[in-house]
């Protein structure tokens, strides 16, 4: 089968099915091939968002129409706030109205918002239907489509309605990134820097030396392949995130709190993670676990890539810093990764190596949140 030629990695899960990650430019010509490899499909349901639909919806639907299945599509409004139970409920209504059954195959065409939402719906509908991730943002290609985590937000509880639900396959096409707005592309770069800091010193050094390996969308394929393959290896070793998969939460402790404090709107996921990584590395330096040179090199690379290393001044103006620090503290302790409200940190000790489940003293966390809310995290 043609599609196998482009398979770059496998994920073993001990949850349900294992799955392949296919990476190929001109993916549309392989979608049908991939769908035909799925046994007993009754209907196809494309879940996408307004932007992606207007860019790629018609060509994907045209390709799918050459197959002999009924096709339906659900278009999610644009905006991260729509990763909600309410939107999931709209999709369930749509599926029931259109008589979707257990043999329905769902195709999530979009970024992490659509992927997480469609993946959760697929898990719950009629005890679970099969689905493909077809990630269209850099962030979703390198990170969110791999690892089987699907979720919606519940109010201020980010990704809190969630489970592990492996896709049937992941189909990634880097040429779709050509239309991605620069700020969204940069947001995905934060996840690559995160990965390099905790697991791949060589990649970090390559990026330091040659940032265009990341910034040039036409050259991104080799970094994508490397990042995806490594993530597949890690999640295969720890599919339920009990151990090393936790390294991927680097920067997400305070990062998530910032994302929610700014209503899922003012800062993109990767931007919030970028600031979160600065906060975690700062904590590492203060506790003597992280060499200060790592914070310095991290700051330099994030800034070079156009990512924030502190909350931007225009956003700081929206909040009183003391109130913001308090809110961040509350949000930080709501996270599912907390043990009795005590955050568990990922702290780098040298480039390419980090520890997870690290506890940090209350007083230091408060000091760190004070810096974050004043925009005064030291940059070097
Ligand atoms: N499940 C996981 O393991 C995991 C990991 C990391 C992040 N996430 C989640 O992912 C979400 C963020 O995902 P995201 O950064 O992909 O954002 P997104 O899905 O919200 O997409 C960002 C924007 O880009 C647009 N877009 C998507 N593809 C495009 C393309 N090819 N061309 C032009 N525009 C395009 C979208 O319409 C949207 O406006 C967050 O909710 C985060 O919590 C999940
Ligand atoms: Zn992330």
Image: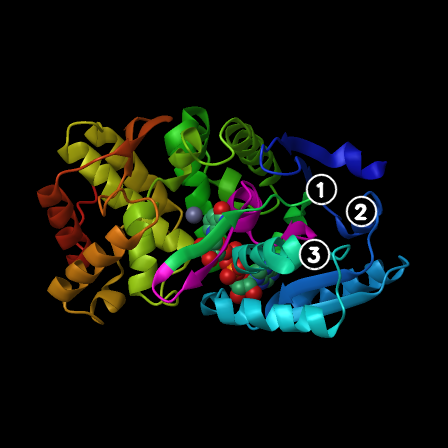
Magenta residues (range): 128-157
Question: Is the residue indicated by label 1 positioned so its CB lies within 8 Å of ligand 1?
Answer: no
| Percent x, y of residue 335 | 32, 51
**Callout 1: SS:** loop
Mark 1 vs mark 3, CA separation in Å: 17 Å
Q: Earlier in the sequence, mark 2 or mark 1?
A: 1
Question: Is the residue indicated by label 2 positioned so its CB lies within 8 Å of ligand 1?
Answer: no
Residue 305 in the image: above or below residue 283: below
CA neighbours of label 3 inside 10 A, class few (<14), some (14 to 19), many (20+): many
Q: Which residue is mark 2?
A: 30
Residue 108 in the image: above or below residue 38: below
Disc nearest the viewer among 1 and 3: 3
Disc nearest the viewer among 2 and 1: 2
| Percent x, y of residue 281 | 25, 37
Q: Is residue 156 shown in magenta?
A: yes
Q: Residue at x 24, y 51 (%)?
A: 333
Residue 351 in the image: above or below residue 369: above
Mark 2 touches mark 1? (CB < 8 Å): yes
Residue 24 is tagged as 1
Disc nearest the viewer among 3 and 2: 3
Residue 344 is tagged as none
**Callout 2: SS:** helix
Mark 2 vs mark 1, CA separation in Å: 9 Å
Q: Is residue 88 shown in magenta?
A: no
Mark 1 touches mark 3? (CB < 8 Å): no
């Amino acid at each position: 089968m043609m599609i196998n030629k482009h398979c770059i990695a496998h994920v073993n899960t001990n949850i349900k099915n294992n799955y392949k990650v296919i990476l190929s430019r001109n993916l549309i010509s392989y979608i049908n091939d991939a769908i035909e490899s799925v046994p007993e499909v009754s209907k196809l349901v494309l879940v996408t968002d307004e932007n992606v639909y207007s860019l790629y919806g018609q060509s994907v639907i045209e390709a799918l129409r050459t197959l002999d299945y009924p096709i339906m599509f659900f278009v999610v409004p644009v905006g991260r706030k729509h990763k909600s139970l309410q939107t999931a409920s709209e999709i369930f209504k749509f599926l029931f109205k259109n008589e979707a059954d257990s043999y329905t195959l769902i195709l999530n065409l979009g970024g992490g918002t659509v992927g997480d939402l469609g993946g959760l719906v697929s898990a719950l509908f009629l005890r679970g239907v099969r689905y493909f991730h077809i990630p269209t943002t850099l962030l979703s290609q390198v990170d969110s489509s791999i690892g089987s985590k699907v979720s919606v937000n519940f109010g201020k509880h980010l990704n809190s309605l969630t489970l592990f639900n492996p896709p049937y396959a992941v189909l990634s096409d880097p040429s779709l990134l050509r239309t991605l707005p620069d700020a969204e592309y940069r947001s995905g770069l934060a996840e690559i820097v995160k990965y390099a800091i905790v697991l791949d010193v060589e990649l970090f050094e390559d990026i330091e030396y040659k940032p265009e390996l990341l910034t040039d969308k036409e050259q991104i394929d080799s970094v994508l392949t490397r990042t995806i393959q490594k993530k597949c290896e890690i999640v295969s070793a720890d599919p339920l995130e009990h151990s090393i998969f936790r390294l991927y939460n680097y920067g997400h402790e305070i990062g998530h709190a910032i994302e929610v404090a700014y209503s899922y709107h003012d800062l993109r996921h990767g931007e919030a993670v970028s600031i979160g990584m600065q906060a975690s590395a700062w904590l590492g330096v203060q506790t003597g676990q992280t060499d200060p040179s790592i914070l310095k090199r991290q700051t330099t690379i994030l800034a070079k890539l156009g990512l924030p290393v502190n909350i931007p001044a225009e956003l700081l103006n929206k909040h009183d810093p003391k109130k913001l620090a308090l809110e961040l503290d509350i949000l930080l302790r709501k996270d599912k990764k907390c043990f009795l409200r005590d955050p568990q940190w990922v702290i780098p000790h040298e480039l390419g190596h980090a520890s997870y489940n690290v506890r940090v003293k209350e007083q230091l966390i408060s000091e760190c949140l004070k810096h974050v809310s004043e925009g005064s995290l030291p940059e070097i």
